[in-house]
Amino acid sequence: MPAPGDVRRRILVIANETAASAEVAAEVRWRAQGRTAEILVVAPLTAPLTGDRASTLKPEERLAEAKVRLGAALSALAGAGLNARGELGDGDPMRALDQVVWQFRPDELIIATHPPDRSQWLNRNLVQRARERFQLPTTHVVADLDRERWESEGGAVPPPRISNDPTPEA
């Protein structure tokens, strides 16, 4: 129960593979700071992937993977000192938002994606469409899981070199 005069913030987070990233946890913690916050994380059931797994990924596997991602996100938020609950959502992130926004009535929305060169959600203009549809303060968090993995391993293996420089590395 919030203390008298304490304003409860309702924060909705939607994320897929990026749900358990340090960037998402830091943003939610910053948004909830100094407030009593109710945090809901929505993990959409992934749509069939492109490539080799697209034809072999069964609906029950999509469900199992989404449950794992949601559990990891809730653990990451708990590790950041935040109490959150989670729900699985439709495989289409906009439909997932439609389903939960009207029930949860958030004060703000956090959408986490991969960097632009790898994000299907950005390719589908999810962030802008959500801002327009829901008229909520919306924060877009870009979570670079490859960079996080590299940093967590102590930077032992450098990230891939992207350059037009034909000079070979020593």
Image (cartoon, rainbow, N blue to C red):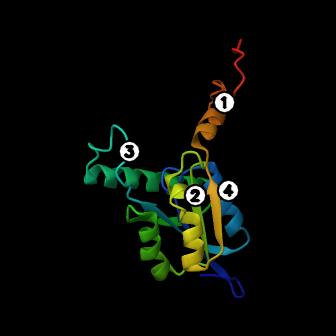
Q: Which residue bears the numbered disc 4?
A: 26
- Image height check: is 155 above or below 169? below
Question: How far apart are the two marked residues, 1 and 4, measured between alpha carbons?
Answer: 28 Å
Mark 2, residues whose alpha carbon is within 10 Å: few (<14), some, or many (≥20)?
A: many
Q: Earlier in the sequence, mark 3 or mark 1?
A: 3
Question: How far apart are the two marked residues, 2 and 1, measured between alpha carbons?
Answer: 24 Å
| Residue toward you, 18 or 53 | 53
| Residue toward you, 37 or 89 | 89
**Percent position of residue 77, x then y:** 58, 57
| Residue toward you, 2 or 125 | 125
Q: Secondary structure at mark 3?
A: loop
Q: Which residue bears the numbered disc 2?
A: 112
Q: Which residue bears the numbered disc 1?
A: 162
Q: Is residue 83 visible?
A: no
Asked if residue 58 lies left or right of residue 100, the reply is left
Question: How far apart are the two marked residues, 2 and 4, measured between alpha carbons?
Answer: 12 Å
Q: Secondary structure at mark 4?
A: helix
Q: Please tell me which residue is depicted at 59% across the width and 68% down the height of the picture.
A: 128
Asked if residue 166 lies left or right of residue 77, the reply is right
Q: Which residue bears the numbered disc 3?
A: 50
Q: Earlier in the sequence, mark 2 or mark 4?
A: 4
**Percent position of residue 70, x then y:** 45, 56
Q: Please tell me which residue is depicted at 63% across the width and 35% down the height of the picture.
A: 152
Amino acid type at image mark 1: Ile
Amino acid type at image mark 3: Thr
Question: How far apart are the two marked residues, 2 and 3, measured between alpha carbons?
Answer: 20 Å
Q: Quadrant of residue 108?
A: bottom right
